[in-house]
Image (spheres, coloured by chain):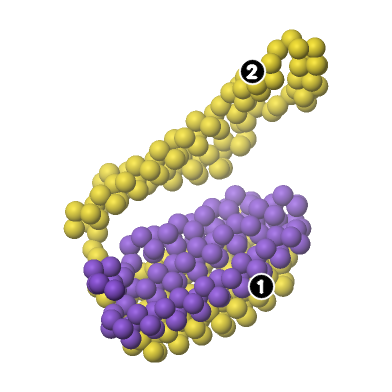
Amino acid sequence: MTALPMEIYFSVSMSILAIGFYILATKRNILRMLLGIELMITGANMTFVIISYWLGNGIVDPLVRSIVIISIGIASVIVAVAISLVIFVYRKFGTQDIRKLRELKW
Amino acid sequence: MISIDALIEILILIGIIASAIYVAEARPISRAVGGFVLFSVLVAILYLYLNCTYLAGAQIAIYTGAVVGLLLLGMSITRLEVPEEPQYRMSIKGLFSASLVAVITFSFIFFYFNYVPSVPADMLSQLIERTKFGLENLEGILADHLWKYRGLDIMMQAIIVIGVAAGLSHFFKKEKKR
């Protein structure tokens, strides 16, 4: 078992989720927003693992491990698709600012 | 006296939070990607502490390898353009609502669970006995039980949700004014 109580781990994973949401809500650079999405996915994965560790008394359930592995794979696919979109947008409009893109006519 | 293991875990958790904040606030995007590398490595170490060796390996391989590589590729193709971030003024109301939510959440997590009254062990058998002979309806008994033993839970969750909604609405109102 870990030396710290599980509530502290849970608070940290929730804080990671909150920081990811803060990035999505306030930042304008698309690449940074992508980093925020990745932070949120990592926070969700951490929450899964921590709750399973807590409920299993030190043993993480194999189902949770497989779900987290699938989630990590899907996160990498999200980044690949989003990077291709970012490159396309930059070539077409010459900007990475999400608010300028909102004002443009497609 | 705090043990060495606890100290290492505290340092890892503080490092995770600090690197996530650095990802959010570093001005050039390349530094934010560097902070994300540190964040992924620290999360992998945390997984190792939680006895998830395979997850730690996947975290290192996929996040620190593939995702960061793709981000660096995107940065190099699109040049390092950094749009100006909007400046937010310090808002007393937003600060107050955020601190209220934080205090309530932490008190709920750390202290409240010690004072929850335990549910009597023979509750289920009583319930079965009383409904078997049609003395009372099941919904009424369940509602009574929930309100008596879990009413405070529901009220605490409602307060947290109201605080979050107030903070969010205030935040978006400030942004709309700009």
Q: Quadrant of the C terminus of chain B?
A: bottom left
Residue A81 placement, left or right of A58: left
Can you identify the residue that label 1 sits on? B56
Q: Tag 2's secondary structure? A: helix
The purple-coloured chain is labelled A
Q: Compared to B159, does B136 lie above or below?
A: above
Q: Residue furthest top?
A: B135
Q: Chain of mark 2?
A: B
> At x 28% / y 81%, what residue is drawn?
A93
Q: x, y percentage for residue A20?
A: 44, 62
Q: How many marks?
A: 2
Can you identify the residue that label 2 sits on? B140
Residue type at numbered disc 1: Ala
The yellow-coloured chain is labelled B
Q: Quadrant of the N terminus of chain B?
A: bottom right
> At x 30% / y 51%, what residue is drawn?
B171
Q: x, y percentage for residue B74?
A: 42, 84
The one nearer the camera, A80 or B39, is A80
Q: Chain of mark 1?
A: B
**Cα–Cα gap, marks 1 and 2:** 49 Å
Corner quadrant of residue B146: top right
> At x 74% / y 10%, what residue is drawn?
B135
Label 2 neighbour load within 10 Å: few <14, some 14-19, many 20+? few
Residue A2 placement, left or right of B110: right
